[in-house]
Image: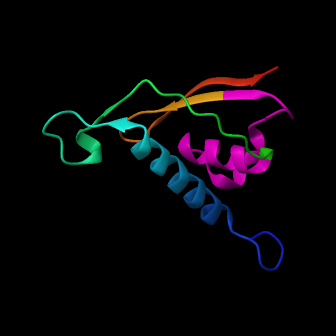
């Protein structure tokens, strides 16, 4: 937990994951007859999200299956571009890390 009143690492990744899940649903085009998000097909849509280094690294660590305590092993430079995609099941593919 950050400080006396801050979020735990798990609370942070859950909050960020909720954001990306909502973004997936907003940018998801359902196929005819599909009645659930998991039966949908994603459109070719890009969104830009600006975030802070620590939160970005926590989320990437979690999505990549790393222990949250090891999030600092992911190096993310200031003002660098990180690009990833999420599929219909919200599985991540890291495409670019630290492009300047």
Indicate left or right for 26 with 85 as reference: left
In which quadrant of the rendered view does residue 98 lie? top right
Q: How is the image coloured?
A: rainbow
> Percent x, y for residue 12?
65, 60
> Percent x, y for residue 18?
51, 56
Question: 10 or 70: which is nearer to us?
Answer: 10
In which quadrant of the rendered view does residue 2 lie? bottom right
Q: Residue at x 70, y 44 (%)?
A: 56
> Percent x, y for residue 45?
47, 28
Quarter the N terminus occupies: bottom right
Indicate left or right for 71 with 15 as reference: right
Q: Residue at x 61, y 65 (%)?
A: 11
The tally of labels here is 0
The outermost residue toward the right is 78
Question: 48 or 13: which is nearer to us?
Answer: 48
The relative height of residue 53 versus residue 99 in the rendered view (above or below) is below
The outermost residue toward the left is 33
Q: Residue at x 41, y 33 (%)?
A: 87
Indicate left or right for 87 with 15 as reference: left
**73 part of magenta stretch:** yes
> Percent x, y for residue 24?
44, 42
The relative height of residue 72 versus residue 15 in the rendered view (above or below) is above
Instruction: State which region is magenta.
Output: 54-82
Quarter the C terminus occupies: top right
């Amino acid at each position: 937990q950050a400080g006396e009143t801050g979020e735990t690492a798990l609370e942070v990744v859950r909050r960020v994951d909720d954001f990306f899940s909502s973004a997936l649903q907003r940018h998801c085009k359902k196929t005819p007859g599909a009645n659930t998000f998991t039966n949908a097909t994603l459109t070719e849509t890009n969104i830009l999200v600006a975030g802070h280094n620590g939160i970005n690294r926590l989320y990437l660590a979690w999505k990549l299956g790393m222990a949250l305590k090891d999030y600092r092993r992911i190096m993310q430079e200031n003002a660098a571009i990180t690009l990833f995609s999420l599929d219909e099941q919200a599985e991540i593919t890291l495409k670019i890390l630290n492009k300047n």
